[in-house]
Amino acid sequence: MSKNKVRDYSKLAKDIFDIVGGNDNIVNVTRCATRLRIVLQNTTPEMVDQVSQLAGVITVVENSGQFQVVIGSHVGEVFNEFSQLANVEENDVTVEKGSILNRIIATMSAVFAPFVYILAAGGILQGCLIIAKYFNESISTTGTFQVLELISWTPFTFLPILIAITASKHFKTNTYIAVACCAALINPTWAEMAARIAGGENLTFLGIALSKTTYGSTVLPPILLVWLLSYLEKALNKYLPEVTRALLIPFLSMVIMVPLTLLVVGPLSNGGAILIADGYNKLVEVAPAVAGMLIGGLWQVVVIFGIHWGVTPMCIANFEQYGQDSFQAFQTIAVVAQVGATLGVFFKTRDKSLKNISLSAAITGFFGITEPSIYGVTLRLKKPFIIGCISGAIGGLVVSFFNSVYYVYAGLPGLLTTVNGISKDNPSSFTGLMIGCAIALILPIVIMQLTGYEKKKTV
């Protein structure tokens, strides 16, 4: 049986738990699509080696202040078992915080990883509706289409609430208060007030003018709200008499945090996200080929270090502000190129075990998850990973010539999400994606058929 094949997830979780030092050393644990992300007080090289050798573990990556155990598609089962062992709620320890960049990336990962599949499901459904509408415009007037469209948009419309849940756990503050505060941001009454402000009406709170900013599908405002709430809640717990805390903490939290967000935090942070998105869009406008080659060629390097969630606010800001995003189109090429490199190994190798691992990893890659391909096949062999990155850069370059974009957010960009680039107003978008994906998928296979997947040894 392959090292990466395991069915006893409770044993794997217990083995990881014991090796990393148990509750005495575990500060927090979250998960993403393929990784168990553990924050530890202390780590040692021996921990990394021992966990890496466990059956069911692909590799271990230490980055962004996290001990990241790469497991693959079965990470959910392992996380469920591990979280029952880890008493993270009771741990009250101080750990080295690391750089600001690492903390931001760790926060994005902790916030988005638990519900990325919900966003992916919404994106896939929207992609299916795009195809249906493309072939039959009148279908959009049917009740069936409108109900399905409603379902597809729900995760994005109520994104601040999903963020409130995961961010409250990350920042260790009351989840229910966080949800109540973030729900106020997407209250229909506020949307109506913001529309009146946009129309020229002067609405104020305690004499201070309110902004026209709305918060459906926003990322930074709810994250910052919950982060500030965590400090406010600690202060209230410290200074309020115990007998009054149950009522006054929720009351004061809501009447302080919601207006503060509507007046200051929300407009500034949302504006910041739009500025970052505009900066990226300017690069694409001035040098699309450079953007395509960089993202198509280097995105999988970013994935290696587990910091790929850091771009999520920018992508969502693009969809919210402009209704499209090119970054995810380039990401798709990078993902497909790594799948192509994995298939290149599959077709070339005569090793039965490697052939099985390659096929399994490639299938997972078609769904936008490339860690099994990277750690199980391409990076391990080195040459296929490099070929995949080069092919991704070439595919990204080609896609840039067609001005390809996504019109719907894809939680996990991959071959199956290319339908998100379909538009009657911009038919070249999908055409470019198809050509870019074909190059990214086929080129690594051809190169490895001609040159092999291992570096030639020199005498």
Image: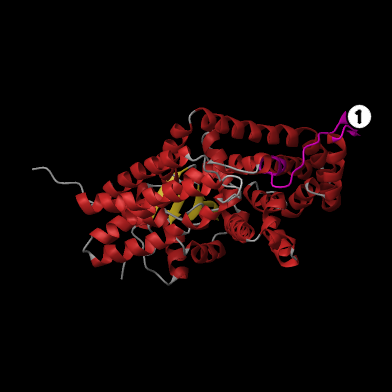
Residue 206 on the magenta span: yes
Left or right relative to 251: residue 425: left
State the predominant SS element of the stretch in magenta.
loop
Quarter of the C terminus within the rendering: top left
Total numbered badges shown on the rendered structure: 1
The image quarter containing residue 419 is bottom right
Q: Position of residue 180 (x, y in %)?
A: 79, 51
Task: Characterize the local packing of mark 1: few (<14), some (14-19) or many (20 or more) Cα atoms within 10 angstroms.
Answer: few
Element on which disc 1 rests: loop
Res. 458 image quadrant:
top left
Question: How is the structure coloured here?
Answer: secondary structure
Name the one closer to the observer, 419 or 212.
419
> Range of the magenta residues?
199-225
Q: Residue shown at 88%/32% (left/top)?
A: 200
Is 164 a magenta residue?
no
Q: What residue occupies the far left of the structure in this picture?
A: 459
Which residue is painted at 58% across and 49% down in the image? 110
Dividing the picture into quadrants, the one containing residue 267 is top right
Q: Position of residue 174 (x, y in %)?
A: 73, 51
Residue in front for this viewpoint, 304 or 352 = 352
Left/right placement of residue 278 relative to residue 44 reads right
Which residue sits at x=53%, y=35%? 101
Q: Residue furthest top?
A: 286
Asked if one can make out residue 34 in the rendered structure from this viewpoint, the answer is no
Q: Is 449 left or right of 205, judged from the image as shown?
A: left
Q: Is residue 458 left or right of residue 324?
A: left
Question: Residue 402 location, x and y as percent?
Answer: 49, 40
Tell me if residue 33 can be seen: yes
Residue 406, image x, y percentages: 56, 47
Q: Name the residue under label 1.
A: 207
| Mark 1: amino acid | Gly
